[in-house]
Amino acid sequence: MTEQKRHGFVGWFFGPYAEYVRRIKPLFVLCSLLFILSLGMGYLLGNTFPGSALESLLGTFPDVSQMSLFDIFVFVVANNASKSLLFMILGLLGGIPPLLFVVLNGFFVGWVAWSLSSASGLAYVVAGLTPHGIIEIPTILLSMSMGMSFGYALLNKIRGRGGFSTEAKYAILLFINRIIPLLILAAVVEVTVTPLFLLLLGFT
């Protein structure tokens, strides 16, 4: 890798994985657009779509009011990391499962935002999601982009074009060395910074 390719935020942050991340940038952009669109749909259709249907698709969540901060932290990390890894691997099925995961999660976040804003206002929702969301959401979208790339690489391998082992190596190493640490950081922010941020803004 040339020195020039290491310049910029991507080169600084992702280091030896920077070229791989740049290569899947179009998939990341696609995932981001789908997430934004589905989030908007979830918000707009919040009053017409039953939350139970989303929970049956994405799994139920425990009552965090009965959990300690450490328990919440462990749950958030385990939930985000396991689902990100699962759907990244399921990307081997033609790259479709990661896209479905992005759309469903975007819709769910939009529905939750509508539910909370109906009770506490949109400002509360934005303040409550922003501190950890700016880390967590792009990280999950990146892992879904990796899953899509996984699937396309396997399809190309079946067609006799390109190799799959290098793709798998970079995806797994990137997940271990960057995705998991970022998800841990997001969880730390969620259980510490986000509540303080809400408190400073006058939300209780």
Image: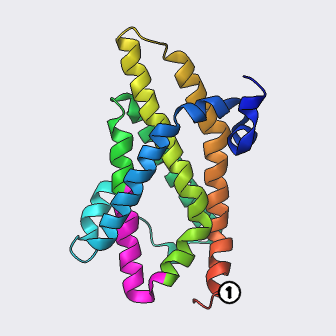
Choose top left, top right, bottom left or bottom right for residue 38: bottom left
Q: Residue at x 55, y 31 (%)?
A: 23
Residue 183 location (% of width, % of height): 61, 52
Mark 1, other Cα within 10 Å: few <14 / some 14–19 / many ≥20: few
In the image, taking residue 82 as reference, residue 119 lies left or right, namely left
Choose top left, top right, bottom left or bottom right for residue 131: bottom right
Residue 119 location (% of width, % of height): 40, 88
Residue 161 location (% of width, % of height): 42, 11
- The relative height of residue 94 versus residue 103 in the rendered view (above or below) is above
Residue 145 location (% of width, % of height): 47, 39
What span is in magenta?
105-122
* Front residue of this view, candidates 70 and 142: 142
Q: Amino acid at mark 1?
A: Leu
- The relative height of residue 86 versus residue 75 in the rendered view (above or below) is above
Q: Secondary structure at mark 1?
A: helix
State how many labels appear: 1
Q: Residue at x 49, y 78 (%)?
A: 125
Q: Assess whether residue 117 is covered by the magenta stretch.
A: yes
Q: Assess whether residue 52 is covered by the magenta stretch.
A: no
